[in-house]
Image (spheres, rainbow, N blue to C red):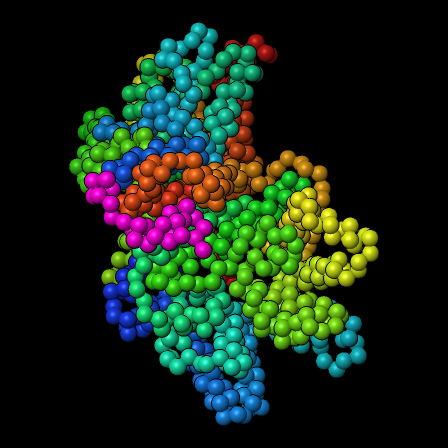
Amino acid sequence: MLFSSLSYLLFLPAAVLAFWLLPHRFRSAVLLAGSYFFYMSWIPLYGVLLFTLTLANYLIGRLLYGKLTGGKKGQARAVLTAGIIVNLATLSYFKYTDFAISSWNYVVSLLGPALGHGLAFQPGSLTFPLQHVLLPLGISFFVFEFIHYITDIYKGSKPIGNFVNFSLFAAFFPSQIAGPIKRYQDFIKQLEAPRVFSAVKFEQGITLILQGLFKKVALADNLSPIVSQGFSHATALGGAEAWTASLAFAIQIYCDFSGYTDMGRGSAMLMGFDLPDNFNWPYVAKSLTDFWKRWHISLSSWLRDYLYIPLGGSKCSTARRHFNLLATMLLGGLWHGASWHFVVWGGFHGLGLVINHSYDSWLKRAGDPVSRTLAAFHQTGVAEVLSTVGTFAFVLVGWVLFRAETMADAMGVLRGMCSPMLASSYLAETIEKHPIFAALALYAGYRLIADNIGRLSQPVPQPLQKLVRPLLPARVVIYASLFILALGLAPATASPFIYFAF
Amino acid sequence: MPTTILEKAASPKASPPNQAVRPGSPWMAAAQALVYLLVCIVLLEGFFYLAQVGDSEHIKPDILVGYKPFEGKRITQRAEGFGCFRLNSFGMQNDEITVEKPAGVYRIAVFGDSYVEALQVPRAANYLNLAGQTLSERLGKKVEVLNFGVSNYSVAQDYLRYQTVARQFKPDLVIQVFRVEEIGKLLPMETQALLFVRPVFFVGEKGQLVYDNTCVKQFFKSKEGKRMLATQWLRAKSRIWGVASGMIQQASAFQSKAAQTLFTPKKAGPKFTLPSDNTRANYAKCYWYMMDKQLAAFKDQCTADGTKFMFLRTPMIRPGMHTLTDNETETALLQKTAAKLKVPVLNLDQAYRNYAGTADDGTNFSDGGHFTKKLHRWVADSLSNFLADFAFPNNRQASK
């Protein structure tokens, strides 16, 4: 049930209606039932996995809290370690089994002939068949939420007493499949608070859903075939095509993921919940550090709190800090998918962050004329523009590593980006088939007006403003028009959300 | 934090909560909603026009022919390739033409289905225009190739289209195009899908053609037919309607799928498979006499009008869809008819298989089985080579 599908458009109003019509004490249970229905509409059996993992983490949380309140810190630490292992083992089995097997088989195929002469057995017998384990949707997200939950209990937070509420924390359908990765303290506080229907929040939710729908179906889904076409000819692309394909992917992945997040946040708002935002204009970041504060915020803050800081964070030697950064980003890359190109992508960003941090430290510490001049230059507008362009270029190269299916393909696209701007031959027809320029122009216009509405409306006299400000029926007309607009630009076939694969 | 226009309009910062949901006077609210509705309609229509969205529907019901293209409507096709063109004022996938044939112009009228209509490529890239250009250049005289193709038309509908539209243009040559599956269009079929609403010609006791449009009349009386007729203006003019009807179609497909899943118990039963090649061949041979009669009548009409007549067999490949067997059966039958009627046949299906091999999996065909630009070029070259000899024998003698 994709957020942009017709079935979700039927499911959501039913869930929202049931939520508001029922008394407060039944709402969590109904929402939980709805969330399991939503999740099990993909593969029913995985509902059992979600439930089992939820139950296990609930019990681990209780046990952990019991040990801590009993003053048994050592035992609590053992329970925490066991809890993290259970979660990571589950994630690893479903996500990384085939990756590990194929990597092992590859190493054997490389080393086997060399070692085979001196061995009493055939190296081929050391290889294993792939298991073809189907990845349960959202597992990477809810496993991270569970780890956060038990770790925070160990750090001193109180566990969730009500099992239904705890189950809902993991299963809440607006954030179940691809985040945002929630923090339980905030979510449970909202869940337990008396909920009063707010028309303003409801409308904000509808607006966010429409905005997300537009980003997904009009932008991301129209870019998807262009990207696929480009990357399937990765090694044969000319300059213009390689740039087109990589830029298209940069926009696609942003619109796809932030569109999903908008729809998820909007859906939650219809029921009065606030989910954390995941994006804050990532492509205008002025440095790589800045980029990671703006892109997939809930994941980067999770990685910071539950990986980077436990590893030692920045309060250690320079070499150790750099190691921590690299390790965090390599694992962050691997979290995205069981493939080496994700690891390379993570390493690439890790390396970029190490350089970024080193440069910042040098600027602060050096104090020589060169660093002082550079520090002064960084305060200018030109430097800001250059930093933004440079950061985007770095991120774009990273996206090529992320999207390409093999390193050879990634190198092909990157080589293409450095070659002459020849006329397009692979992409022209695909671009022509999709109204992507119209959608991009419309979205750019919308953002321009939306972000400047205050300034634009200033010169308009107050009485006219009052007359023009849409009342509810007019707003309904606008929402309906936006819905038609988004679906009008949608291609015939919808693409699944990119982050569903993670 | 609100980030969108409407969020800001509705946010507590922009206005106090009670103001954001203020009811206002009901009359004021209704009037304002009406104004907003009109503005939204104008903006959406304008945007969809510029974005070339919402104008994929191109046919309307017609009591005589079953259905026919809208006259003068702009069509955008994105499903297989990309094409955006305006049908001319006669409802043809053609540039505007005059009824009067200009002096010195040789007119070729081509009849067939979507393979002739060629909505999947730009108009300039379809084989009719390419062949017209090639012949004009080669012969040093203007050759106009008129496109009378309409999606899913049968030979009966082509014959009617000749009589009602094409005849007035006084073509010098009529080309009836065949591909596989023509046989399936010979018999009447009750349907709610406009693309399948067609009259048929039966063969009477004395061998004469008997026109029967019962199925068309039934469609006109049906719920879907009435809906189509009632909304014809919107279908012709409104792009919002085009988008909305696409959404409705998706919704009803979803509804029927859901109903099927929920209310129809799953039971094991025989799986539907296409009839065997032998059955299909027997079916084609059995009903071909109807085709024979229609083609004979079409040819006689053309001859009476002083117009040459020929058949063009274009290639068609749909992997796993019996097309090779069907093609061979129908081609053999068509060649028999052609010999009987003394009408030339250009068999490009066979030529294509010689060119691409019988194992070809449809490389030069689009996802939906239509011609790609490359195949249009190949058909155009083959056709113009043939026509240079067939339609202009004097020219050949002169060049010898």
The part of the image, by quadrant, that contains residue A307 is bottom right
Instruction: Return the residue nearer the eye: B173 or B258.
Output: B258
Residue A494 seen anywhere in this rendered image of the structure: no
Q: Which residue is at a point 29% across and 45% down the rendered structure image?
A: A471
- The quadrant in which the C terminus of chain B is found is top right
Q: Which residue is at a point 75% across and 57% down the rendered structure image?
A: A363
Position of A174 relative to B238 (above/below): below
Position of A46 relative to A239 (above/below): below
Task: Report if residue B10 lies within the magenta region.
Answer: yes
B85 horizontally vs A235: left or right:
left
The part of the image, by quadrant, that contains residue B378 is top right
Instruction: Return the residue nearer the eye: B223 or A320.
Output: A320
- Residue B38's x, y, as percent? 30, 34
- Residue B352's x, y, as percent? 52, 35
Instruction: Return the residue nearer the eye: B5 or B221.
Output: B5
Q: Which residues are magenta?
A: B1-29
